[in-house]
Image (tube, helix red, strand yellow):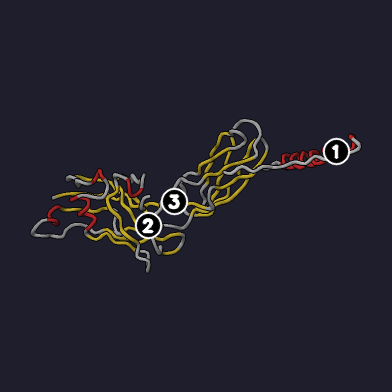
Amino acid sequence: MRRLVSAGVIAITSLALATPALTSTAAAAPATADTAVVAAKVKAGKFKIKKSAPGVQPGISKLVLTSKGLRGSGKVKYTITGDNGAVIKGKAKVKKGKAKYVVPALGTGHYKVKAKFKGRKGKTKFEVYDSAMTLSTTAVSCFRSDFRSPYTKKSTQLSGSVKYKGAPATSGYVDVYQNGNAAGGSSSPYLLRFASINPANGTFNFTTGFCSAVINGGTGSALKAGLPNGQYQFQAYYTKDAGYDDYFSSNYITVTVAD
C-alpha cells in the first residue's frame, strides 16, 4: 500500500393575475400534492438506507449504512443476516433525521439488512467479497547466523497467494506491519517491507529478504535498527494499487528472532 461548490441562482418571475382568488388556489395546489406524497410515504412505513459501497472486504469494518428520512429521536435497530448463517444486531442513534451504522467486520457472503424505527422499516443488502490471503506459514524463524559468514540459511521464507473478489489478484502489493499497525500505509513507522503481486497467478514471495528486514532493519522508522532476539507479531495486508481504499489482511504471523 503505497502512500498515500458553486452556488446556483434561481430566478422567479411573478405574473400579476386579474383575480387574487385564482392566484391563491393555483399556488396552493402543488403544496397540497407534495404534502400528500410525503404523507403517503410515511404511511407506507418505509425509509431509505444508503450504503457507502456495494460491498466490503472480509475482516474489515468499513461499510457504513445511513438511514434517511427519519423523524423524531431515538435509535434505529438493525438486523443483518448472511447467507453463511451469521446474524448481527446493532443500533444507531438518530441525528438530524439520519442514523449511521458501521457494519462490523464480517466473513465472506451476501447479507440482507432490515432496520426498524418507530414502526417504520428500511432494508438493503450488501456483499462481503470472496477475497483471501493464503500464507506459506504463520510462524517464521529468523536467524542472525544467516547474515554472517559462514551462512547457514536456516531462516524461514515467507510467500503466499492472494484471491481478490473471487479470482487470483492481477496487481497490487502485500505489505507486512508489526502488530498489524497499518495506519498511514507506506508512511507507517511499523512497515517492515512489501512484495509485489505476480500478475500471472496472484502469488507473492518475500524470499530471504523478510528475515533480513527483521534483523538488519525494515522500511518504517520504528524498525530501521532491526529487532533484537525475541518473538514478535506481524500481519500482512493486501492492497490492489498504490492507494489504500480497498484492502484486507492476513492472519497474524509469529516471528521468532534468534542467533
- Amino acid type indicated by mark 2: Met
Query: Residue shown at 85%/40% (left/top)?
Result: 26
Q: In which quadrant of the rendered view does residue 28 lie?
A: top right
Q: What residue does disc 3 label?
A: 245
117 displayed left or right of 253: right
Badge 2: how crowded within 10 Å, few (<14), some, or many (20+)? many
Seen in the picture, residue 129 relative to 48 is either above or below; the reply is below
Seen in the picture, residue 164 relative to 96 is either above or below; the reply is below
The location of residue 37, given as percent across then percent down, is 76, 42
Q: Which comes before the other along the chain, label 1 or label 2?
A: 1
- Amino acid type indicated by mark 1: Ala
Dot label at residue 133: 2
Query: Residue shown at 65%/31% (left/top)?
Result: 72
Badge 1: how crowded within 10 Å, few (<14), some, or many (20+)? few
61 displayed left or right of 207: right
Whether pointer 3 and pointer 1 mark residues with C-beta atoms closer than 8 Å, the reply is no
Q: What residue does disc 1 label?
A: 16
Q: CA distance from mark 3 to mark 2?
A: 17 Å
Q: CA distance from mark 3 to mark 1?
A: 56 Å
83, 102: nearer the viewer: 102
Q: Secondary structure at mark 2?
A: strand
Extreme residue in the right direction? 19
